[in-house]
Amino acid sequence: MVALLWLILLVVLVVWLFGLILDIAGGFIHILLIVALAILIWNLLTSRRGSP
């Protein structure tokens, strides 16, 4: 499940970067960035590093 979240994060960031470079899709690109950041924060908060 965590690997899937990282994959989604990567795809969204690549699409955002692609749209930023080509200046397409306007506000939709920013929505994708917010979704990517939310996934990153969720992943960091729910990770279980350090628990035995």
Image (cartoon, grey):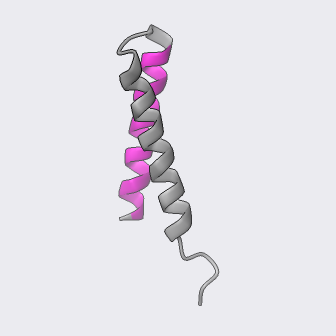
Q: In this view, does 43 lie above or below 51?
A: above
Q: Is residue 44 above or below residue 9?
A: below
Q: Position of residue 3 (x, y in %)?
A: 41, 59
Q: On the rendered image, what quadrant is the N terminus found in? A: bottom left
Residue drawn at (51%, 52%) of the image: 40
Point out the stretch of residues depicted in magenta: 2-20
Decide: is 15 above or below 39. above
Residue in the picture at 35% in, 56% down: 4
In the rendered structure, does residue 12 fall within the stretch colored magenta? yes
Which residue sits furthest front? 27
For the point 59% across and 90% down, which residue is it? 52
Q: Depth check: 43 or 11 in front?
A: 43
The number of numbered discs placed on residues in the rendered structure image is 0
Question: In this picture, is 49 found above or below 40?
Answer: below
Residue 21 included in the magenta stretch of the image = no
- Point 42% across, 63% down: residue: 2
Decide whether the magenta segment is chiefly helix, strand or loop.
helix
Expressed as whole percent of the image width and height from the top left, the position of residue 35 reads 42, 42
Quarter occupied by residue 16: top left
Looking at the picture, tell me which residue is in the foreground, 29 or 50: 29
